[in-house]
Amino acid sequence: MRCYTCGFTNANGSKVCEKCGTKLKAPTEAPVPAGVQPGTRVNNVQVEGIPTMRGAISNQPAWDIEPEAEFKCAACGHYPLKSEVSNESPCPNCKSTGEKEVHNGTMSFPNLFFGKAVAHSTPKVKLVDIATDKELEFEGDDVVLNRANLNPTDQSISSAQHVQFTREKDSWHVTDLSSNHATFIQVNGKVGVESGAHILIGNRIYRIELE
């Protein structure tokens, strides 16, 4: 069966053109021969329809195709189509049937935490003056002490930086940074330190309490 839109020859009995998607319709009446007026008889056959026009394009609808709305494929944009894309009339370009595809997969939520939140306390270094029981507390996992934050009047403490406490994982370390090496625990570079130990900084002895 020949498609009168694109000229493609389809198999007999086809309802939709395989090439352009136009609905196929068998002609119910033959075209009028040129020069023959409708209503006349040719070879004892009554001629019906619209006469064939020569030298001009008729503004009448095609004799074998009913006027139809033009459609566009939402999947690939193919246009025009004579019928809406469906299971019975798929798009001739991309074979889409117009149904939305549903993709199943696993969604990841890297920034979500399910469960009870665990509170994390801020690391602290507390120094207790053995002579006066005065407490000095410093927060952070990297604490540098000097004359200003320990005892501004003690000239034996270095003014810029004297000692450093650092927390690495679950252990603390102390590093002597003074120019005269006047930090005691017996420190040679970087050593571990535990809560309750005494440390001599300048001319004062402190007890270390770590949290």
Image (tube, rainbow, N blue to C red):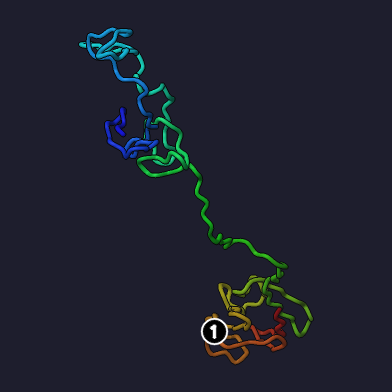
Report the side of 171 relative to 49 (left or right): right
Q: Quadrant of residue 203?
A: bottom right
Q: In this view, does 186 lie to the left or right of 52?
A: right
Residue 177 visible to an observer of this rendering:
yes
- Residue 156, image x and y in percent? 61, 80
- Above or below — where is 150 with respect to 102? below
**Residue 152 in view here:** no
Question: Does 154 sit left or right of 74 as displayed?
Answer: right
The residue at 72%/82% (across/down) is 209
**Which quadrant of the structure image shows residue 4?**
top left
Number of other residues with Cα within 10 Å of mark 1, as a class: few under 14, some 14 to 19, many 20 or more:
few
Q: Which amino acid does label 1 sit on?
A: Asn
The image shows residue 44, relative to residue 121, as above or below, that is above
Camera-side residue of 206 and 208: 208
In the rendered image, the quadrant that contains the N terminus is top left
Give the quarter of the figure containing the C terminus.
bottom right
Against 21, residue 128 (above or below) is below
Which residue is located at x 60 percent, y 80 percent?
Answer: 169
What x and y, as percent, mark residue 15?
40, 36
Kindly indicate the quadrant of the structure image that contains residue 70. Answer: top left
- Counting every numbered tag in the picture gives 1
**Residue tagged by mark 1?**
180
> Is residue 195 shown above or below 74?
below
Q: Which residue lies furthest to the left in this view?
A: 55
Horizontal and vertical percent position of residue 92: 36, 40
Q: In the orientation shown, which residue stands out farthest toward the right?
A: 133
Viewer-proximal residue among 125 and 28: 28
Identify which residue is drawn at 29% across, 12% down: 58
Residue 111 lies, in percent from the top left, at 59, 61
